[in-house]
Each structure stands twice: as C-alpha cells, then as structure tokens.
Amino acid sequence: MGRTAVECTRDELADKIGRDIATVAKSAPLPTGALVLDPFTGSGNTLYWMLRHLPDAHGLGLEQDPLVFQLTARNLAILNLSIEVSNRDYRMGLSSLNMEQDQLLIAFIAPPWGDALNKRTGLDLRRTIPPITEIVDFLIGIARKNPLLCAIQVYETLEPASEAQLIPRFSWSGKRMYGLNAPGQNHGLFMGTRGWVP
C-alpha cells in the first residue's frame, strides 16, 4: 500500500533534496566556496539539510513573515551552523547580497504555490507567487559571472510550457522525483546550472 502525502515527513524530503543538490554542487568549480540561499526559508528545514550535505558552505535564509522569521532564527541558532537568516523579502535580501568572485551560488527556490497547482495539468511554474522565472532571472542578475545552481521544488506533474520556459536559462538542467508518497502526490526537484555542466 502506498504512503499518503501526510506520511512523508518533511525531513525525508528535505534530506533527499539536500543530498541531490550537494551531488550537483560538488561538480562545480569551487575556488572560493559556496553560498547556499533559501529565499523563501519558512521553517529553515531544507536549508538545514542542504548545509548538512554541504558542510563547508555558508547558508543564507530570507523570510518575509516576522513571526516565522523569529521562530526560524531562534531554532537555527540552536544548531550552531553557518546560517544567517534575515527578515526580508527575496528581492530586498538578494539586492544586498555580497558574493566573492567565483563563489558558487546555490539557490533553493520554493515560493508559495498559491493556485499554481492544478490537479489536471499539474504545477504551473509561471503562476507561483512570485513566478519562478522572475526569481531565476533575478538570481542570474545577482550571480553575474559566478557559477549558479538553481534547485526548484516541483510537483510530480509539471505544466510543460512552464518547464519549457525555464530550460533555456541554464547551461544544464535535470529533474529528480521522490517516490515518498502515493503516485501522483510526489514532490521533486528541477535543477539548472549556469557556468558549468555537471
């Protein structure tokens, strides 16, 4: 009997996401290390797991909601990891981002889906809040010539045209699906790199 969405724990999914991101990131040129960014941090769970798999990286989380930010900052401080959390929206937080030359920027992108998920057509990445392409384009502008890895949380069924809009923005792209739930209820990861091919 398959597991339901409720039975899949957030840690299982975040661990697998962190592991797959680390696998791709380790193939990148890393002359000045890596900065792991979660512009929609929420609880910080995925950011934590990414840094578990990339222990030499520095983490930066951005969370707009003041209460969620306070809880997340307090919980992450207890872990004594190299993570900084800021109470800003993604545009303001990224605009003040200081990156070293040649530093790898790894961004986990999971904005609110709102009504972007349709049972018939799947997840439309153009309808997330904000749209995924808007976030990716902003990150490309921030990274400039630095290598960039975008890891976008997706659903088992993706609206094809929205995925097709993403692919040309990257030097390489690929998807992973995690069979942690019943068929048709699984989450996955769309990854894209700029500046190298894994």
Image (cartoon, grey):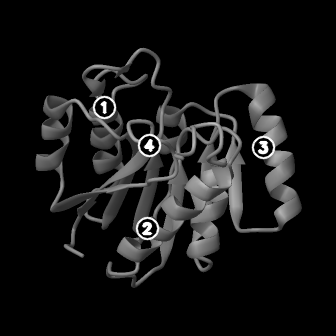
Residue 114 point in image, percent of width and height: 47, 18
Q: Which residue is mark 2?
A: 20
Which quadrant holds residue 191?
A: bottom left
Task: Residue type at mark 4: give it.
Answer: Asn
Q: Which of the marked residues, 4 or 1, is nearer the chain's N terminus?
A: 1
Instruction: Name the disc covering residue 160, or none.
Output: none
Q: Where residue 101 appears, x then y in whole percent?
A: 38, 71
Give the vertical position of 69 relative to 25 (above or below).
above
Q: Which residue matches tag 4? A: 186
| Helix, strand or loop for disc 4 | loop
Residue at 57 percent of width and 45 percent of height: 3
Q: Mark 3 = which residue?
A: 72
In the rendered image of this protein, does residue 73 appear above or below residue 22?
above
Measure how far apart labels 1 and 2 are at the Cα level. 24 Å
**Residue type at numbered disc 2:** Asp
Q: Are marks 1 and 3 in contact (CB under 8 Å)?
A: no
